[in-house]
Image (tube, rainbow, N blue to C red):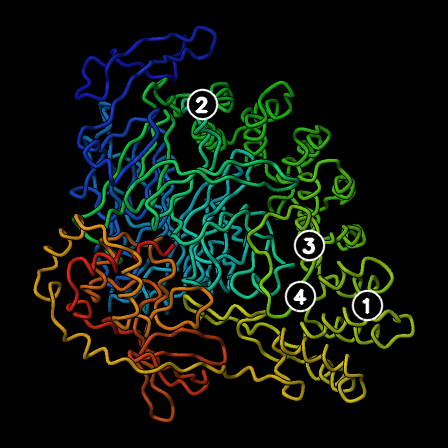
Amino acid sequence: MRDSIWPLKDNYKHMKGTPILFVVLLIALACKPEKKVEIIESTTTPSLDSLSQALGWPDELAVQAFSGPDLTPSPACLAVSPYGEVYVGVDAIGSLGKTPGKGRIVKLIDKDNDGKADEHTVFAEVDNPRGIIPLGDKLYVLHTIFSLEDSVATGMDLVVFEDANGDGVADGPSEPLIQHISSPKFLQGRGTDHATNGIRLGIDGWIYIAVGDFGFHGAVDRDGTEMTMLGGGILRVRPDGTEMEVYTHGLRNIYDVAIDPYMNMFTRGNTNDGGGWNIRFIHQIQTGEYGYPVLFKNFTEEIIPALVDVGGGSGTGALFIDDNRWPEKYNKVPMMADWGRSQLYIHRLTADGPSYTQEEEEFFKLPQITDLDIDGTGRMFMAAWDGAGYSGNEEKGFVVRVVPKVWEYSEMPDLNAADIDDLVDLLKEESATIRLYAQQELVSRGSSEAASEALDLAKSSGEPLYARVAAMYAFSQISGAEGVAEMMALMDDAEMKEHAIRAITDREAYLQNLSIAPFVEAMSDPSARVRAAAIIALGRIGNKAAIPHLLEVEVPNSFQAPELGEEGPHASPNSEIILPHLAVRALVDLEADTEILEEVGSGNSDLALWTLRYMHTPAAVSGLISRYNGSATESVELKRSILATLARLYTKEAPYDGSWWWGTRPDTHGPYYKSVLWSASPEIKALFQQLWDTGSRSDKDYIAMLNQKNRMGILEFGGDYSVTEVLEEPEVDLEKIKNQKGQIGESSIEDILLAMQELAGEAVKGKAIFQQQGCKACHSIEAGEQMKGPFMGQVGSIMTREQIAESILKPNASISQGFATVMIQTKDDKSYVGFVTEESAERIVIRNIAGQAFTLAAANIKERTEMENSMMPAGLANSLSYEEFASLITYLSEQK
């Protein structure tokens, strides 16, 4: 008889510490192989109980102090192997630091399962680690690369290390999988801030990468494929570093992705400092456009909206938990960390057509939580930045282990010792971690037996859907294109149809010679999720014969552009817009301009004209003008819709070369950030000029509106898009205020912070002090106010009361995102120092320390430098008493 893959232990008699109160052995007699389950009652580490004000969690859970700053300071990310080996990305450079040599991956092991790390090694030295995936003897890491010659950041790479001898240290240098996946210019200027971040492996075998809105220019994978992306989104690549492709686009500064067993994907973003894009929970649908920064306000009808806007904060790590050992009410949900709020949230999902609605719940309070992951036994690990600052701190940060108080524990099976039958059986386990790693071991075997048994499970209608989906993707990864015919048969199974469509069209090699017929049929399926998968599939297959079928997708009445000057609904679920949105993306990929033109005025004009907005081809422009002038186009509404499409096509987004970035408060007017004219622009202008010269007052008003909304920049039609009128405000003598003395000026910062712990302050008084001290000269509070210096309307969501106090008392200690001082030299030899409060491709608005604003043409800027010191001088609060200062920081802490 072969050995069991389920390891046995000697009744845990050797365990130390208080977490284990008693152990009862249960033998599961009905399963193969024999699985030993132990009921463990765990308690919380006493030292954590004393931190009850800084931490909080449900009563059903026990929390242990796994590692402290002596081992894992400044933990930016973590990942855990199925066996419980914890890898922590230590980043003592932080998000705004720029000095290399302070980062590493630390591997930690808890040998006796008491919740505390017993062994550790420095697995590898890397700077700014942002994402980790352990897989067998490999470790995938995403991190910043610095030049060995001058210690300057040169980009970010996704790399893989190997530890073949299992000593906990990488065997040698890493191998790059994707290089240059973040723009070096902004890594050098700001640090690894809005850069590329977390990575997670899906059950489909792809590595998904959270790309911040630095975007990237000239990223190269192992195939030699080169790619550029303006702005943020999700990228994916195979574990061997090939087949890199964009999955979704139009996000701000996402840090991680949560992926469920059926490849539904969720993110929690990052606020743009009062510019309207707050923390938002988003369902990521393949090919979807989410609109940041140029579409989400004024072109809302074109995007997939977020499921919710939850205000200020800073989204970080994410995990979809699927583990039956956890309490039911905390299982099968996306868990989304928020560093700014020091909170891990649960989002309760309700199916809504091809997407969801959600309800957010606070779940676990942890100081500046950065990441979380779960192993194959149900042990969850969470990392806390804990005040390590924006530039890292070797004395701050820790990791905790979290388990149910009553925990049905069984050790992770030995996957290397498992045979094919065992591995396929493990795909039925009610743990997403076990399923994922068992599947990957099955794929690594690569045998015909492994493929056959996986396919048998995928076809088994009596088995759980999660097991069938995991088995289907195992089969597809083993069999490749040769297995497509077998997967096609799964489309006849209603339960598997959506997932089979995705798997069949998941990789470019599978698409050769695919008939579109079954996917066209699927577009009529009763399930909206199947229809969505079919639309995406038709776009990926690339057969133009799909165009007329895609043009049958109806556009709902909710497809309505916001009125000029009004902000559209960009964070309210709208499931009915998703199918036409996906159809538009598919039609654009099919380059269907000629075929779509036939629909204008005679078929599905709404979908056709929506699609044509993105088709900057001479054929599209001449075709639209022909239809506008044609005798068959008599409808005033249709004529105006054609003009609206032509106005959109008049300019286009400039090719991105990686030399610029839109900053933390970009121009959100849209539809482009840096627009340029192109070959068909004169043809469009000629039509508009003719109508302007001969049209009615109503015609001219409509043309003027289109000119303004689309920023065509035709001055004859009104408007001036190269400068912005800025309301000037009176000077405030901050130097005079600074020199007034009081309790704050006479005390040490330590004494002040201790006093603030005892004094609650009064927010009403604090508001008056905010005005009295001249704070309003450089800071706005309300989102509708003229933007000045750093926006304070959400500061309470991203900083604690103590951090606010410290930032006022020591403004140079840590300069936050959006708070940096900039010096600009112009070509006419003028110099400006202040905060950039507004920025577009054509102009920059900078406000100096006295509150004066200056509008500068971008073309006149010779040099722009981000200063290392804050423009805010120390001592501005020196004249205040303890009580007044407490009231000020209380008022600011309530701004969320």
Residue 594 at what x, y percent from top left?
79, 65
Residue 770 at what x, y percent from top left?
29, 66
Which residue position is annotated with label 1?
638
What is the distance, in whole Å, between disc 1 and disc 2 at their CAs? 56 Å
First along the sequence among labels 4 and 1: 4
Residue found 26% across the figure and 66% down from its top? 769
The C terminus: image quadrant? bottom left
For disc 3, the neighbor class at 10 Å (few under 14, some 14 to 19, many from 20) is many
Q: Quadrant of residue 599?
A: bottom right
First along the sequence among labels 1 and 2: 2
First along the sequence among labels 3 and 4: 3
First along the sequence among labels 3 and 1: 3
What is the distance, in whole Å, between disc 3 and disc 4 at their CAs? 12 Å
Residue found 50% across the figure and 57% down from its top? 251
What is the distance, in whole Å, between disc 4 and disc 1 at their CAs? 18 Å
**Which one is in front in this view, the residue at disc 1 or the one at disc 2?**
1
The N terminus: image quadrant? top left
**Which one is in front in this view, the residue at disc 3 or the one at disc 1?**
1
Which residue position is annotated with label 3?
586
What is the distance, in whole Å, between disc 3 and disc 1 at their CAs? 24 Å
**Disc 2 marks which amino acid?**
Asn
Residue found 48% across the figure and 75% down from its top? 840
User: Does residue 267 lie above or below 714 as drawn?
Assistant: above
CB-based contact (under 8 Å), mark 2 and mark 4: no
CB-based contact (under 8 Å), mark 2 and mark 3: no
**Disc 1 marks which amino acid?**
Leu
